[in-house]
Image: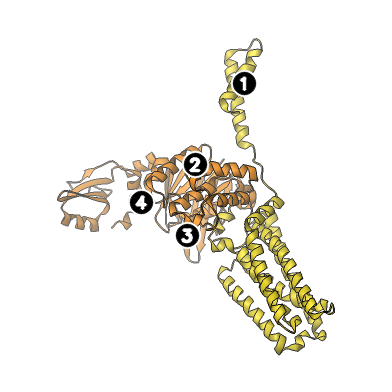
Amino acid sequence: MNSRELERYLRDSFGRGEEIKPEKEAETVARCMEAMRRYGDCREEERTGFWQFLSDVFRFEGLLIFGLQAGVLFLICMQIGAIEDVMHYVPAFTPLFALAVMPVLLRSQFYKMGEMEAVTRASGAEIILAKLILAGAVNLIGITVVFGLVMYRRQSGEEIGQIILYGLVPYLVCMTTILRLIRLRRKERLPVCAVATICYCLVWGISANKMPQVYETSAVGVWIVLFIAFAGFFWREIRFIIENKREGKLYGIIG
Amino acid sequence: MELSVDRLTKQYGSKIAVDCVSTVLKPGVYGLLGENGAGKTTFMRMLCAILESTSGEVFLDGREIVSMGAEYRDILGYLPQESGYYPNYTAKEFLLYMAALKGIPGDVAQKRVQELLEVVGLSDVAGKKMKTFSGGMKQRVGIAQALLNYPKLLILDEPTAGLDPKERVRFRNLISDYAGDRIVLLSTHIVSDIEAIADEVLVMKRGKVLTQGTVSELTKKAAGKVWELTVSPAEAKIWQEKAAVANLRHEGEQVVLRILSDDKPTEEAVSCEAGLEDLYLYSMREYLR
């Protein structure tokens, strides 16, 4: 209802009553219109919740997230088909999934959108969390496919626990490092982190041949300790993001 | 609504970018003037709560803005000085993406994006990728995204940069219409833009607010300090070295100088009416010599 319609409506309503003083009528109409105007200004517009936001992020970023992860999975599958003792190379594969998450997490910085996005209702933490949920879900699928293929190549389900540890420990190391650098706003160190992740893959690849003792059953204890430690560090970073999101604080690299 | 800034300071090492600025902004259009490096962008970024202050606070109706979090950002619209864009998004997709980040429901966002694209004159290129846009067109998309949530506090850092004269006039009219009972703060180097739309002007220099007031109040401050002098080209060079020359124009063989000076620079000088640009240049007069 626009103000002219409102005024007409109020005047018509008064017209039906009896003994209304014209000066009071005008005053009441003015007061009602002022109240309506104020109500219109104060009325809060509806805002979407986190799950709707997650769906929106999926709509806009989904293709990039899935494309990068699918590319990495394809490359790893090619390697799994070509390598003989594939189990020892699992630690060299999984950091690539973490590497493929980086462009998604850092896209706004790359395109100088950090400031513009930081002043929106969705805090930086909320944006990163939504991207992490989507990328993490795809990572989980990708890493599971890798484990399945490795077991298929070995024609055995034995040592599944070891394969999982070999895959998850390097992945958690890389993801924790990336999130920590974002949290500490070390923008300049992120390219170094990306290069380090690639080197990390190479080192693990070399270790498969040069350090077989790392993959012996007796070394499983060390892998378990590393897994628990880095799962803890990773969870700490995620918890920090969740807390920042809840409090609506700024998070990550802005400008 | 009232945005009060209390002794806001930002220091980078030994350099003070914003130095103990205190001011109160009430609904209206505020123009922020100052030379490069005066601290305008730093000041605006702190008002947007995307840059932590070294000391001092900003309050919106008595509530500290950083602690308001999403509630504050919900009423805020911001166009940064160096606004980025996603090159593979079309203008419409970009605005829908920003609307999603602002938490605007899809159906409302669709309508508003269409409406804003028309307001900024880009509805005919809404489906074109932003990488094909000129600087001015990208700037107009940036202005549109700042208005998506109908912000009660609109902060625009050099919004007219890259806009052609016609677009600048369209922008000025848009802001004048929009302001109403909202707070609009904009910075620009184009003094005429501020003169045309700002209710109040803040002049910043070396991190401090030198002066604040309406355009007429500020131009009064420059009254009696603006002089015109007609000299030969050779004399003009001498005057440029020894006085603050705001403007220089050739008239036939002679040169007409617009000089900013507290006292009459010479007997031949004629006093003339001061504008906001004169006040601004008067504040920065050491750079003119």
Type of the residue with mark 1 = Tyr
Point out residue B65 in the picture as x, y percentages from the top left corner: 60, 50
Where A196 falls versus B149 (above or below)?
below
Cα–Cα span, label 2 and label 3: 35 Å
Residue B17 is labelled as 3
Query: Around disc 1, counting alpha carbons within 10 Å, would you say few (fewer than 14), some (14 to 19), or many (20 or more)?
Result: some
Where A233 falls versus B27 (above or below)?
below
Which residue is under mark 2? Answer: B119
Where A148 falls versus B141 (above or below)?
below
Point out residue A138 in the picture as x, y percentages from the top left corner: 71, 64
Given residues B286 and A116, the one toward you in this image is A116
- Mark 4 on the same chain as mark 2: yes
Query: Around disc 2, counting alpha carbons within 10 Å, would you say few (fewer than 14), some (14 to 19), or many (20 or more)?
Result: some
Residue A30 is labelled as none
Chain B visual colour: orange
In the structure shown, which secondary structural element does the residue marked by tag 4 occupy? helix
Chain A visual colour: yellow
Q: Identify the residue at image location x=80%, y=86%.
A: A216
Type of the residue with mark 4 = Ser
Q: Identify the residue at image location x=23%, y=46%.
A: B228
Given residues A4 and B260, the one toward you in this image is A4
Q: Chain of mark 3?
A: B
Which residue is under mark 1? Answer: A9
Q: Chain of mark 1?
A: A
